[in-house]
Image (cartoon, helix red, strand yellow):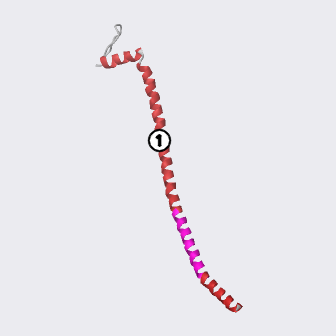
Amino acid sequence: MDNKRQRRREGRLRRRVPRHRRSVLVVSTVVFLLFVIVSVKSLSLREKEAAYKAQKMELEAQIKEEKARAAEIEELGGYVGTDEYVEDVAREKLGLIHENEIVFQAE
């Protein structure tokens, strides 16, 4: 009787081993595919990160230029309110001069 039980047990084990091997193979394949997918996505994310860093640097340079331009405009705004600016515009655009000035013109 024990011999029969032992043979049955061995028969069941032999049938389980191929199933076990197949399941291990399937699980291994799935894990490998997931690894490949994650690696590919990682590369695309790194490319996006590099593009975003370049864009950030470009935008920071533009911000710096605009701040410098704003400072120039602020400075010009201060100059426009002075009497010196009014005199300069009157001379250049309107051709006006002071009463006691002499104008020399080139021939």
Asked if the stretch drawn in magenta spans residue 26, the answer is: yes
Q: Residue furthest right?
A: 2
State which quadrant residue 104 falls in.
Answer: top left
Nearer the observer, 69 or 53: 53
Quadrant position of the N terminus in the picture: bottom right
Q: Secondary structure at mark 1?
A: helix
Query: What residue is pinned by disc 1?
Result: 59
- Give the quarter of the image for residue 86: top left
Looking at the image, residue 98 lies above or below residue 40: above
Q: Determine the residue positioned at 47% across, 43% down.
A: 58
Q: Would you say 38 lies left or right of 17 here?
A: left
In this view, the residue in front, 107 or 99, is 99
**Residue interval drawn in magenta:** 17-37
Where is residue 57? Give x, y as percent: 50, 43
Task: Answer above or below: position of 40 versus 83.
Answer: below
Residue type at mark 1 is Leu
